[in-house]
Image (spheres, rainbow, N blue to C red):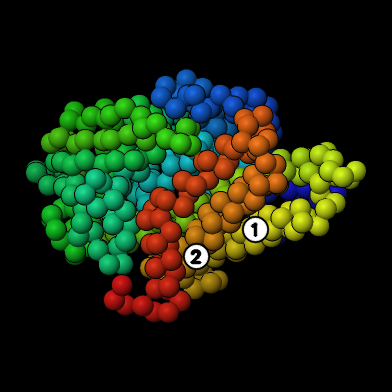
C-alpha cells in the first residue's frame, strides 16, 4: 500500500548526505516532536517547549552548521537548495510554524553563505556562534508598518519604500527604523539581517542594504510575541532600531550586490514555502488515510465510496504535482550551469513564485478537503488535522502573499514590464 515515500522525490538528484539528514529529521520528529505537538499552540508566548526543540534541530542535528563553510566550523552542504527542500518537506509533516522558525534561522544569512558570493570575513566571524554548542538563531527582518511586503517587490519598487535607514558614520552604520512580523523576532533571535536603505525614498538598488545587527546591540528593542490563529512555533514581534551602531563590515556585500543577492533569498523563500507545504500535505494524507480506512459507512470503509475516493485523489494529486515542481526547481537552483539561470537573477525569483503560489494553494485545498471528509472530528485536536488547516493558511500570506506571487510569475512568463 502506498505511503508518503511513494510521492515524487527524485532520488538521483539528492545527495547521500541530504537523504541521511532527511531520515534523521524524520526519526527525530517521531521521537521528540510528535509527542508534544498538541502543546505547541499554548507555547506561543514563552516558547518553553519550542526553544529546546529548536536547539535540538539547529544545533544538535547541525542544521545551522550545514550552510557554513568548513573554515567557519560548518558542514558546507553541497546541494543547499535541495537540502533545504528535503529539510522543509520533512519538518513540514510535523509543524509548519516550527519549520518556518528553523528555516528562517539561516534564511537571511544566505547572501553571505552561498557560493560563489560568500563573504568569508562574516562567515568566519559568525560561524562559531551558529556552529557552536549553544542555540544561536537568525532572524530576517524585512516587513515594515508603512509598506508591508513592498520590500519584496523589488521588480517595481527597487527598495524605494524602505523606511529603515542606514547612515554610514565613520566606520559604523547607524540604523533607525521599525520592523514587524519577522520570524524568530521577540525573545528568540540573536542576529538580525536588516533590510535598510542608505538613502530614504531612493529606487536606486545601490542604496538597498543588507546589514547584520546582533540582537543585544544598544538601541535594539523588541515587542512581545503576536498571538496568531496558527503557527505558534513561529514567534513574530516588532523590532525597533534607535541609532543602532554596527561595524561597516556588517553590510553583507555592498551597493548593488545586496539587492542582487536579496533576490536569491526570495528564490529560496519561494522554494521552501512550497516544500514545507508538501510536508503538511503528506501528514494530512497520513491522517486522512487512516481515518477513511477505519471509518465504516453503510457497511464499508469510507474510502470505498466513490464520492470520498474522488476527494482522496485530489489530495494525492496536490502532493504529487507540488513535489515534482519543487524538486525540479531545487535542482535548477543548485545547478545553474546546467539550466542557465542563476538563483539570484530576477528570472529565477519570478519563476519560483509560481511554485510557491501553487504549493501554498494546494496545501490549503488539501487540508480543507480532508477536513470535509472528517467532518466534526477534523475540528478536534485529537487528529492534528485542524492544526495543519489553521497553520498552512499563513503560507499564502507572507512574502507579498498570493497577489505578488501571481504578478511576478506573470512577469517571468509574459515579459510584463509596467506592473
* 227 displayed left or right of 52: left
| Residue 280 visible in this rendered orientation of the protein | yes
x 53%, y 27%: residue: 40
| Mark 1 element type | helix
- Give the residue at x 56% y 51%: 364
Viewer-side residue, 80 vs 301: 301
Where residue 182 sits, quadrant-wise, is top left
The reply, left or right, for residue 402 in relation to residue 373 is left
Quarter assignment of residue 407:
bottom left
| Percent of width and height locating residue 276 | 56, 48
Cα–Cα span, label 1 and label 2: 14 Å
Q: Quadrant of the C terminus?
A: bottom left
Asked whether 124 or 364 is in front, the reply is 364
Residue underneath mark 1 = 318
User: Which element carries disc 2, helix, strand or loop?
Assistant: helix
Task: Name the outermost residue toward the left.
Answer: 170
Foreground of the two, 108 or 78: 108
| Mark found first going from the N terminus, 1 or 2 | 1
Q: Are the residues flagged by discs 1 and 2 in contact, CB closer than 8 Å?
A: no
Asked where in the image residue 170 lies, by quadrant, the reply is top left
| Numbered-mark total | 2
What residue is at 55 percent from the left and 32 percent from the top? 57
Q: Is residue 10 visible?
A: no
| Percent coordinates x, y for residue 159 in the rendering | 23, 59
Identify the mark at residue 301; answer none if there is no mark.
none
Q: Is residue 109 above or below residue 153?
A: above
Q: Measured from the top left, where is residue 254 in percent x and y?
A: 24, 55
**Of circles 1 and 2, which is in front?**
1
Q: Residues within 10 Å of mark 2 (few under 14, many from 20)?
A: many
> Circle 2 sits on which residue?
354
Disc 1 crowd rating (10 Å Cα; few below 14, some 14-19, many 20+) is many
Amino acid at each position: 500500500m502506498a505511503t508518503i515515500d511513494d510521492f515524487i522525490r527524485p532520488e538521483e538528484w539528492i545527495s547521500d548526505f541530504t537523504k541521511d539528514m532527511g531520515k534523521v529529521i524524520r526519526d527525530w520528529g517521531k521521537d521528540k516532536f510528535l509527542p508534544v505537538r498538541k502543546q505547541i499552540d499554548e507555547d506561543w508566548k514563552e516558547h518553553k517547549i519550542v526553544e529546546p526543540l529548536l536547539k535540538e534541530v539547529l544545533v544538535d542535528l547541525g542544521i545551522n552548521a550545514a550552510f557554513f563553510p568548513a573554515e567557519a566550523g560548518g558542514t558546507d552542504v553541497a546541494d543547499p537548495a535541495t537540502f533545504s527542500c528535503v529539510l522543509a518537506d520533512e519538518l513540514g509533516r510535523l509543524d509548519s510554524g516550527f519549520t518556518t522558525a528553523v528555516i528562517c534561522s539561516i534564511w537571511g544569512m544566505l547572501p553571505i553563505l552561498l557560493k560563489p558570493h560568500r563573504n568569508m570575513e562574516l562567515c568566519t566571524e559568525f560561524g562559531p556562534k551558529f556552529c557552536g554548542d549553544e542555540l544561536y538563531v537568525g532572524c530576517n527582518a524585512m516587513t515594515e508598518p508603512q509598506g508591508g511586503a513592498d520590500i519584496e517587490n523589488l521588480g517595481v519598487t527597487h527598495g524605494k519604500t524602505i523606511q529603515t535607514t542606514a547612515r554610514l558614520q565613520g566606520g559604523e552604520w547607524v540604523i533607525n527604523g521599525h520592523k514587524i512580523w519577522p520570524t524568530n523576532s521577540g525573545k528568540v533571535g540573536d542576529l538580525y539581517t536588516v533590510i535598510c536603505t542608505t538613502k530614504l525614498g531612493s529606487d536606486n538598488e545601490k542604496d538597498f542594504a543588507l546589514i547584520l545587527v546582533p540582537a543585544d546591540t544598544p538601541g535594539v528593542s523588541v515587542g512581545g510575541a503576536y498571538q496568531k490563529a496558527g503557527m505558534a512555533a513561529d514567534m513574530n514581534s516588532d523590532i525597533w532600531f534607535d541609532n543602532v551602531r554596527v561595524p561597516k563590515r556588517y553590510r553583507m556585500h555592498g551597493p548593488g550586490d545586496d539587492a542582487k543577492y536579496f533576490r536569491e533569498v526570495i528564490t529560496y523563500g519561494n522554494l521552501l514555502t512550497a516544500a514545507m507545504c508538501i510536508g503538511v500535505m503528506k501528514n494530512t494524507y497520513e491522517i486522512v488515510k487512516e481515518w477513511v480506512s477505519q471509518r465504516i459507512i453503510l457497511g464499508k470503509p469510507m474510502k470505498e465510496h466513490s464520492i470520498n475516493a474522488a476527494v482522496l485523489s485530489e489530495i494525492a494529486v496536490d502532493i504529487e504535482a507540488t513535489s515534482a515542481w519543487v524538486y525540479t526547481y531545487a535542482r535548477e537552483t543548485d545547478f545553474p550551469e546546467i539550466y542557465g539561470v542563476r538563483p539570484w537573477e530576477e528570472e529565477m525569483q519570478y519563476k519560483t513564485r509560481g511554485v510557491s503560489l501553487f504549493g501554498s494553494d494546494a496545501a490549503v485545498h488539501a487540508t480543507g478537503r480532508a477536513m470535509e471528509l472528517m467532518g466534526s472530528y477534523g475540528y478536534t485536536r485529537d487528529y492534528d488535522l485542524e492544526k495543519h488547516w489553521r497553520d498552512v493558511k499563513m503560507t499564502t500570506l507572507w512574502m507579498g502573499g498570493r497577489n505578488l506571487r501571481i504578478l511576478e510569475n506573470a512577469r517571468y512568463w509574459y515579459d510584463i514590464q509596467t506592473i
